[in-house]
Amino acid sequence: MFEKPQALSSITDGEISGMRMIDSEGEILTREVKVKFVDGEPIFLEAVYIWKNTSDFDRFMRFANSYAKSNGLGYSEKK
């Protein structure tokens, strides 16, 4: 879930049909996306990506780690 998503700042209303997660390996796509607008401003974006097997999970984790590194974010596993 993203609060006040800057990626949607140029959109004032309408239907969002999906979200693409793009990295050096290619693209991951989900169509399960919800966006709420208030007074023409995007307030939140919720995207759900469901992996169906370990290959999908591994691919998503590579994307998540790459995204985190590129955006100064961190990741740690619970122990």
Image: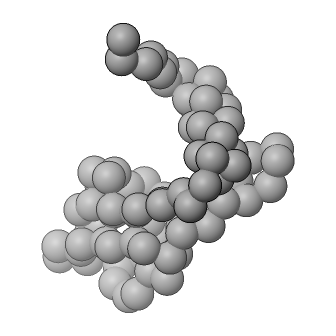
Residue reaching furthest to the front: 53
Q: Quadrant location of residue 13?
A: bottom left
Q: Is residue 38 visible?
A: yes
Residue 57 in the image: x percent, y percent?
Answer: 59, 46
Residue 4 in the image: x percent, y percent?
Answer: 30, 54
Q: Is residue 23 above or below residue 12?
A: above
Q: Quadrant location of residue 27?
A: bottom right
Query: Foreground residue, 5 or 48?
Result: 48
Left or right: 18 in relation to 8: right
Residue reaching furthest to the bottom: 14
Residue 24 in the image: x percent, y percent?
Answer: 82, 44
Q: Quadrant of the C terminus?
A: top left
Q: Is residue 9 above or below residue 38?
A: above
Residue reaching furthest to the left: 38
Residue reaching furthest to the right: 25
Query: Foreground residue, 40 or 35?
Result: 35
Query: Foreground residue, 37 or 26?
Result: 26
Q: How is the image coloured?
A: one colour
Query: Foreground residue, 72 or 49?
Result: 49
* Residue at horizontal 82 percent and vertical 47 percent from the top: 25
* Residue at horizontal 29 percent and vertical 67 percent from the top: 42
* Residue at horizontal 24 percent and vertical 74 percent from the top: 37
Left or right: 60 in relation to 43: right
Q: Is residue 47 above or below residue 14?
A: above
Q: Is residue 66 above or below residue 49?
A: above
Q: How many marks?
A: 0
* Residue at horizontal 27 percent and vertical 60 percent from the top: 44
